Amino acid sequence: MEWENKVFVVDDILTKKQQEDLKRILLSSQFPWHFIPDVTGGGSRDGRPAFQNKLIYDGKVNVGGKALSLLQQLIDNSLSKLYEELNVKANYELFRVVAILQMPLANLGGSRRDAHHIDFKKKHLNILYYVFDADGDTVIFENMYHPNDIKAPEPNELKVKKKVTPKQGRVVIFDGYHWHTGTQPQKGIRCVININVYQK
């Protein structure tokens, strides 16, 4: 797979109007956010609560209308940019799309970085979209997951490959086997859309 071990950062993946429309939908009082006790699914030692919405999950579409249209445009544009970078056409299958909303935490223990993780053990591609400007960089490590690994690398074993600052309209596209994490925001809320696709 030509995208293995690569990271691509693309700004303005959607038009300014599309960016604003998507932001307005996600931040409206009608949008259904659901509480989760830890943003990494339980990997953080001190628990880092957040909110999520499983927009598309295990093949089930839980969103419609304008939001679904914007998500489809976001995915199509991201895969088109990947094609431009690699000049290789591939057939992708969408697995899940999850929106995540984080608030600044007053009682944050230890590092601002959340627990490093991979999203799935099956080979996949991650597309992270930033809904608006925020602090709380995404950190992608050189360290790669391997199916024969017994456990995750220790924090002191991690080597940073790329840090990406949340900027409205920006996507970072990377090999999902890179261990990676988010950083807790301090100055305001942080909102990302996490998209996972497989290459058939």
Image (cartoon, rainbow, N blue to C red):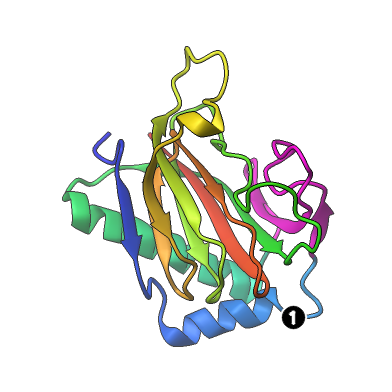
Left or right side of 10 for 168: right
SS at circle 1: loop
Instruction: Indicate whether residue 86 is drawn in magenta.
Output: no
Q: Is residue 74 left or right of residue 58?
A: left
User: Where does the image place residue 144, in percent across and percent down from the top left?
Assistant: 41, 29
Quarter of the image for residue 47 reads top right
Measuring 30% from the left and 36% from the top, which residue is drawn there?
A: 4
- Relative side of 35 to 73, left or right: right
The amino acid type found where label 1 is placed reads Ser
Residue at 42% x, 69% y is: 170
Q: Residues within 10 Å of mark 1 (few under 14, many from 20)?
A: few
Residue occupying the point 27% across, 33% down: 1
Relative vertical location of residue 187 with respect to residue 180 in this rendering, above or below: below
Please tell me whether residue 90 is drawn above or below residue 137 in the rendered image.
above
On the image, the x and y values in percent for residue 41 come to 72, 40
What residue is disc 1 on?
28
Residue 128 vs residue 150, the one in the foreground? 150
Magenta region, residue range: 33-62
